[in-house]
Image (cartoon, rainbow, N blue to C red):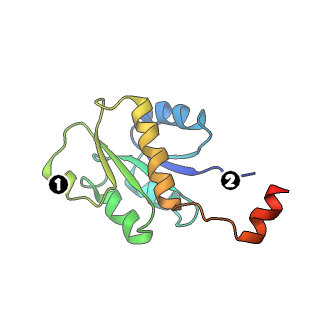
């Protein structure tokens, strides 16, 4: 059995409930936080596979969450959602910056899926002996 990918969602309460439902119905494990400080308490490299958060959090400057997550685990993808995309958002080390409300849920899910695949890397080919066994 493959392990569920864990996504840390950081946003306001209403958006968190929508994202949690959307992601859990697709098989992801979801951790939620309302502030950057709470998110960083939950963020553990190796235990969180992707961060999905607001670029505007009440306790941190825009993009601050992305900076901290990338310092702790540079390979973990960070997706930021913003009501308005400003220059300081584009300077954040997010892997993807999306305008809130402009991206349909299906496109957001596909973007998350692709970022997780990219992080995992290409599947390795089976060694010749293993491929013969699998073919038997």
Q: Is residue 55 above or below residue 25?
A: below
Q: Which one is in front, 136 or 103? A: 136
Q: Which one is in front, 106 or 93? A: 106
Q: Is residue 58 visible?
A: no
Q: Is residue 29 visible?
A: yes
Q: CA distance from mark 1 to mark 2?
A: 35 Å
Q: Residue furthest right?
A: 136
The reply to whether discs 1 and 2 touch (Cβ–Cβ < 8 Å) is: no
Label 1 or label 2, whichever comes before in sequence order: 2
Q: Residue at x 52, y 32 (%)?
A: 22
Percent x, y of residue 93 = 29, 61
Q: Which one is in front, 106 or 53? A: 106
Q: Is residue 33 above or below residue 65?
A: above
Percent x, y of residue 77 = 42, 57
Q: Residue at x 44, y 31 (%)?
A: 106
Label 1 or label 2, whichever lies nearer to me, is 2
Q: How many marks?
A: 2
Q: Residue at x 52, y 49 (%)?
A: 7
Q: Which numbered disc covers residue 3?
A: 2
Badge 1 element: helix
In which image quadrant can residue 85 be found? Answer: top left
Q: Is residue 90 left or right of residue 48?
A: left
Q: Is residue 100 left or right of residue 48?
A: left
> Which residue bears the numbered disc 1?
88
């Amino acid at each position: 059995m493959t392990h569920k990918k864990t996504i840390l969602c950081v946003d306001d309460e209403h958006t968190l409930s929508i994202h949690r439902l959307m992601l859990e119905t697709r098989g992801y494990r979801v951790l939620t936080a309302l502030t950057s400080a709470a998110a960083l308490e939950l963020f553990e490299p190796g235990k969180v596979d992707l961060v999905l958060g607001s670029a505007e959090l009440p306790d941190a400057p825009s993009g601050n969450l992305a900076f901290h997550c990338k310092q702790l685990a540079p390979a973990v993808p960070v997706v930021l959602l913003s009501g308005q995309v400003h220059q300081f958002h584009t300077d954040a080390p997010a892997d993807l910056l999306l305008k809130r409300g402009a991206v349909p849920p299906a496109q957001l899910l596909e973007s998350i899926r692709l970022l997780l695949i990219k992080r995992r890397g290409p599947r390795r080919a089976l060694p010749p002996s293993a491929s013969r066994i699998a073919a038997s």
